[in-house]
Amino acid sequence: MIRLGIGYDIHRLKKGRSLILGGVSIPYEYGLEGHSDADVLTHAIIDAIIGALGKGDIGLHFPDTDPRFKDVRSLDLLKEVALWMKKEGFILNNLDSIIVCQKPKLMPYIPEMRRNISEAIGADERRINIKAKTKEGLESVGKGEAIESYATVTLIKEKLR
């Protein structure tokens, strides 16, 4: 059995916050505004896995109105979702994701992001792809006001032993 999930997230940039993407702290004058660490990449991945499992979306399970999730590390939430996936007998087949931002340049940080996501999910790093794109100056992301991320995952049912 194969399941497909699609995830998306966007957060505004704000001075005085840390910029965390894929669990990596990236030096930049702005960070992402949010209830948690606002890691848009990890949030999109969480949303994609939850979708593939048919369990709604990230806001249903980790609402920004719940004080338990204030400033929570998104990689910890991803670890929890990976446990749900495994309890249902699924493993990650493939993850493809995109981070869309005008600045900063993300290419040097992608290998560490891949390692962090791989460890959190418990999947081979070769099954995880992360791309960085810009909006060519268009819309809020292109104007440097926000960062967004997209993710697709395929999950496969582990073979019975």
Image (cartoon, helix red, strand yellow):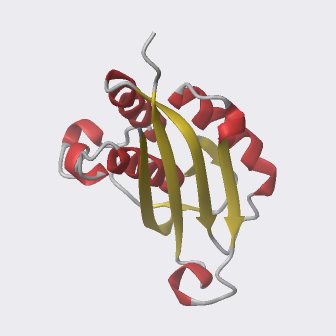
For the C terminus, give its image quadrant.
top left
In the rendered image, the vertical position of residue 66 relative to residue 136, given as above or below: above
**41 or 127: which is nearer to us?**
127
In percent of the image, x 37 and y 34: which residue is there?
A: 81
The answer to whether one can see residue 67 in this image is yes
- Answer left or right for 59 relative to 97: left
For image coordinates 43% across by 63% down, the residue present is 9
**Image quadrant assignment for residue 88:** top left
Identify the residue at image location x=24%, y=51%: 56
Viewer-closest of 73 and 55: 55
Q: Residue furthest right?
A: 108
Q: Position of residue 101 (x, y in %)?
A: 63, 71
Task: Tell me which residue sits at (64%, 63%) in the image.
Answer: 29
Q: Quadrant of residue 74?
A: top left
The extreme bottom residue here reads: 138
In which quarter of the view is residue 33 placed?
bottom left
| Quarter of the image with the N terminus in it | top left
Q: Is residue 159 above or below residue 118?
A: above
Count of labels in the image: 0
Q: Position of residue 4 (x, y in %)?
A: 43, 51
Question: Considering depth in this image, is 13 or 50 the residue closer to the camera?
Answer: 50
Residue 135 sits above or below residue 159 on the image:
below
Side of 1 relative to 129 (left or right): left
Residue 103: percent from the left, percent from the top? 69, 70
- Residue 16 appears in the picture as rendered: no
Whether residue 119 sits left or right of residue 10 in the image: it is: right
Task: Point out residue 89 in the picture as x, y percentages from the top left corner.
Answer: 37, 24
